[in-house]
Each structure stands twice: as C-alpha cells, then as structure tokens.
Image: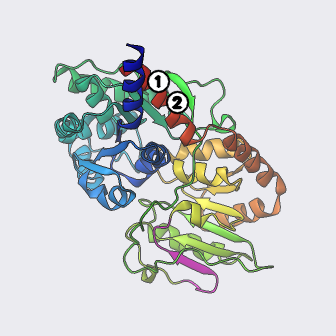
Amino acid sequence: MSDWISSRSIDILLNMRILFCATPAFGHALPLFPLARAFQVRGHRVAFVTAAGMAPLIEPEGFTLLPAGPMPDVLFAEVARRTGADPAGDPTPEGVAEFFAGVRLDLGGDAAIAAAREFAPDLIVNELVDFTGPLIAAALGTPMATLAFGPAAPPEFLAAMTALAAPRFTARGLPAPTRVPAGRWLLDTCPPGLQYEGVRLPGEHVPLRPEPHRAGARTIPSGPGASSAATPDAAAGARPRVLVTFGTVFADPAVVGPLLAALSELDVDLVATLGLDGKPQDYDLDPDRVTLVPFVPMAELLDSVSAVVTHGGAGTTLGALARGLPMVVIPQGADQFIQADRVAAAGAGLALGPDRYTPAAAADALRRILGEPAFTKAARGIGVEIATMPAPESVAEQLEATLAFRLV
C-alpha cells in the first residue's frame, strides 16, 4: 500500500491540472502569470478561464484558454443598464459588486462551469475579485487558492460583492461564498510596508512575491501604430529616466498628453506607454524628450528608470516597488486610490487625487521625488520586503505537495 501511495503521489505531482480564473482585464490576469508559469515549468497543465478576447495575452504564454463570458466593454454596458453606475471611473460598493459578482456570473458563469468541468482541475487559483473561480470550485468540489494583488480592499466593497454573488450560487444549487477572498489559501502579494496596519485577510496565509510582468516564451503583440521596440538603453551621464504609465485601460491621451507636456519641461527623459489602443499620432510631443512605447512587459520598462509616474494599478505599483522605485501616483478609478494612499503612507511616493491633480502639480511632485532621497529610500525598503517574500516557484511547490497529500 505504501508503494502504491508513493507512486500515486508522484503521478499527481507530475500531472496536475491548474485552472486560473481572472476578470477579463490585463491588470487582473497578469499578477497570476508568475505562479502560472511556475506550475507550467513544473510540468503541470495550466489553463485560464476568462473572456475569449484575452487570447492575445493568454495563448502566447502557452496557457490553455477556456473562454467564458464577454470582455469588459460588454460588462460595463450591462452594469450601466442595470444600475447607471460606472464601476471603473466612479467605484461604489454597489457598482463594483454588480460588475464582479453580478453581470460576470450572469453572462459567463455557466460557460465557465462547463469549460472547467471538461478541464477537470486539481486546483483552482482565482484573483481576489473574480467570482467564477469560487463558482467553479463549488460546482466541482475543487480546492481553491485566492491571490490578492495589493493592499486590502475596503470591507464594504467585499461585503457588497459577497452579498450580490450569493443568489447566483444558490440559484444553481451551490453553496455561496461567505467571504472574500473565498479560497482556502490566501496568496498574499502585498508587502507588509504597503498593507494597512492590523489587516489580515482570511484564509491560510501564503506570502507570494509579486513580480513585474516579463515576456513569456513567445512575443507579446504590440499595439497598433507603435514601434515594437522596448525602451532605449540609458547612456552614461544621461538625464534621469522616468516611466509614465497609465496601464492598458486608463491611458487616455486627453489625460496623459498634457501630463507628458508638463513633465517634459523637467530635466528628465520620459518613457511613456500607449496602452492597448493608443497611437503615437495622438500626441504632439518632443521625440527627443519623450519616447512612446506600445504594450511592453513591465520588467523591461523598469530597466534604468529612476522614478515612475502612474495611475496606480496594482501590478504597476508592486512592480515598481519590487525594483525600489519611488512614484507619483495619479489615480483614475478602480482600486487605484488604495494604491495611491498606501504608497504615500509608506513614504515611497506622492499621491495626487482628483482634488489636487494638475499637470503642473504632477511636475512639481516628480521634481520632489527625484530631488529628495527619502522617497527612494522608502521605496527601496519596500523592495527589500518584496525580495524576501517566497518566490512563485516555492509557492507552487508548497501547493503541489499539499494537493498531492490530499488527493491520495
């Protein structure tokens, strides 16, 4: 019997199926990639349940895509039809809950269950505000881990999502989650110096080192009308290089253009991302001072950078802090106000909310960030915290061993 258990354990260790579940947006899927790659490298089959429109991001990594539900434009339109709310630009508990726990389950929940049932996962990994993962876990009886990709969200938002999801589960005869995060394991990517004091989310706590997004085995498609080149190499004695990025969704030229014009008045070289759909012709800027780039993995963008000016997406924030880079955070919506607050509280940067932001104020803030060493010192301190967190490979091995013991 012991020999059978041993061989069965080895078989499970070598042949698991890991299902990742993500809201159909780059900022929600990318934080899952380091752990997904770690499982893939260890020989397991990895799949993602999300919208079919995410194929250009998912499939080049060699992950299987299990399409379920529409992309955010359809989801936002349905939220607006039902509630009149804009959960991206003006996040309220009700609007956010309707997006993540309402329309996503209504328009894609059954397809997610069907696709997952065929895939037959041994483990589900969802991101914090994804509810298809808990729905699948309840339907299939599969263990689940939940990845939290930043400081804790306000309790009223989590409570609203839990309450709105409940009838979607019970209508399918499934037990509803009683908490967010819903997984047995909480994969926590937030370093202690960025978290709210005294906050500890439920679940078996497993720290997981966040990593800036890097290119996978194949080339990631570039945006239309932009060079596929990454940032140029820094020359010796050159001006400080500053990365300006508002992510893949919030890079509105009407916002970013005036910001870049103001920042270019400083003695710095700017590297600015175009988002997914931006085009260089949307901007009238000095090409000797501003380099516009398409979607490029964050790990490449951060090379030789002295500071970051950003909207404060969780992946951008944690990626920059992993490199010890101070930031000016200009939140536009979603959870970006949380990141802005925590970066400022940690002394790792300055935050400019809607009541304080102007392009000139952002230029003044960047001047301070570059001129006052305390900001870089604080950012590097958080970077040290991140470096000591367990790597994705270690966490994959830990979960793998726990699952193998459970399954035999």
Q: Nearer the viewer, residue 369 or 292?
A: 292
Asked whether 159 falls inside the magenta stretch, the response is: no
**The N terminus sits in image quarter:** top left
**Drawn side of residue 179 relative to residue 257, left or right:** left
Residue linked to disc 1: 402
Residue linked to disc 2: 398
Q: Secondary structure at mark 2?
A: helix
**Drawn side of residue 358 relative to residue 125, left or right:** right
Q: Nearer the viewer, residue 154 or 141?
A: 141
Callout 1 touching callout 2 (CB < 8 Å): yes
Extent of the magenta region: 285-296
Please tell me whether residue 215 is drawn above or below residue 43 in the rendered image.
below
Amino acid under label 2? Gln
Label 1 and label 2: CA atoms lie apart by: 6 Å
**Residue 341: % across, % down:** 62, 43
Check residue 154 in the rendering and tell me which mark sits there, or answer none.
Answer: none
Is residue 185 shown to the viewer in this render? yes
**The C terminus sits in image quarter:** top left
Find residue 311 and report its image quarter: bottom right
**Residue 44: % across, % down:** 38, 42
Residue at 17% across, 40% down: 111
Q: How many marks?
A: 2
**Drawn side of residue 215 relative to residue 138, left or right:** right
Residue at 64% across, 41% down: 342
Q: Nearer the viewer, residue 196 or 57?
A: 57
Q: Tell me the crowding category of disc 1: few under 14, some 14 to 19, or many 20 or more residues within 10 angstroms, Cα based.
A: few
Q: Tell me the crowding category of disc 2: few under 14, some 14 to 19, or many 20 or more residues within 10 angstroms, Cα based.
A: few
**Residue 300: % across, % down:** 58, 66
Amino acid under label 1? Thr
Residue at 77% across, 61% down: 368
Residue at 40% across, 38% down: 92
Q: Nearer the viewer, residue 243 or 163?
A: 243
